[in-house]
Image: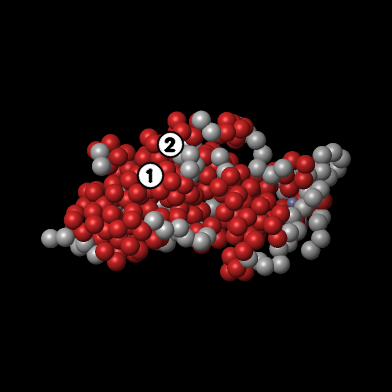
Amino acid sequence: MTDSPSQWAHSGLTCRDLTERVSEYLDDNISILTKVRIGLHLASCAHCRTYVQQIDLVSSVLNSLPNLYPPPMNRLRLHQQFATRYSD
Amino acid sequence: MNADIAMYTESIGHFPSMSRTSPVVKSSGLTKAEDTVLARLRRGDEGAFDELVNQHHGALIRMAMGYVADREVAEEVVQDTWMAVIESLDRFEGRSSLRTWICGILIHKAKDRGVPEKRHTTFSAFESYDDDSEEAVDPSRFQQTGELAGHWAFPPQPWDDRTPEKLLASRQAVNAMQQAIEALPTTLKEVLILRDVEGVDAKDVCEMLKITETNLYVRLHRARERVRVAVETAIG
Ligand SMILES: [Zn+2]
């Protein structure tokens, strides 16, 4: 779908306005009116659809970044403490 | 473990989950999985403790790095956090989720430990982030004048690798994301890590950081946009 400024204007939101609201939109934490306006804009604006997808993608992969672990000595001390505290 | 921390963190109440990704939260504030983990921990199950550490250590380190000078100090702060978790596990009432509680302890300890050290670094170079009215997306990417003012001038180009798996398989993209997170000022870093890395509910994040929901979304979105731009630059 190509951009259609007439429809995009119809939503009352510019791309610039929309991009600022994307995180609330993805959390579904916006008023129904704003949600409808964003929906209208997205229906006619491929660039903003791409933008929303990219923000959604980035936010959803952040919990899968390579893990970090404590240094072995630290872990050992934690284990000792845990064992002391919770062994019967 | 001092009583302050227990009160501070236990004061974070339960709110209905609004997250797209968070598992279902029961009325106690704990997910079923967390309930099981907590029971195992209290029985002294070292495997459960290891899993807990493995699951959260990275996020805690990344968050601590927002407050303290270097990785070494961050490890100490996180170690203190784990010690406090061990010490107070049996007093944890489960009114917030386990991860929210652990993150609350971390923030408390990191602030105690870190702020003065961080102030002495080049941190002030980021002062502008405190202005929550600043736009997330670089304004020069939009048309400035005419009928199309506010419309994209330099729109985002679709990424070929659109699935999470493919994005995570790209070493360039992962490095770019990690570096972008590391470079975030503390106020942006803490919301991004709590919300997206740890999956803490939006309302709990607001409560922990004493910010409004409007602030949260301004900061969260600015942080996500910086990470997005980093990926865009790396693979675009
Ligand atoms: Zn648009």
Q: Residue at (45%, 53%) from the top-left corner? A: B59
Mark 1 falls on what kind of element? helix
Q: Residue at (29%, 49%) from the top-left corner? A: B83
Mark 2 falls on what kind of element? helix
Who is closer to the viewer here, B232 or A67?
A67
Who is closer to the viewer here, B124 or B89?
B124
Q: Chain of mark 2?
A: B
Q: Residue at (45%, 30%) from the top-left corner? A: B116
Res B64 quadrant in image: top left
- Can residue A70 be seen at all in this image of the molecule? yes
Residue pointed to by mark 2: B114
Residue pointed to by mark 1: B77
Who is closer to the viewer here, B175 or B19?
B175
Which quadrant of the figure contains the C terminus of chain B?
Answer: bottom right
Residue B77 horizontal/vertical position (percent): 38, 44
Tag 1 and tag 2, C-beta contact below 8 Å:
yes
Which quadrant of the figure contains the N terminus of chain B?
Answer: top left
Position of B23 compared to A5: left or right? left
Residue B37 horizontal/vertical position (percent): 30, 63
Residue B209 horizontal/vertical position (percent): 44, 39
- B184 above or below B43? above
Characterize the local packing of mark 2: few (<14), some (14-19) or many (20 or more) Cα atoms within 10 angstroms: many
Q: Residue at (78%, 44%) from the top-left corner? A: B142
- A27 above or below B167? above
Residue B135 horizontal/vertical position (percent): 67, 39
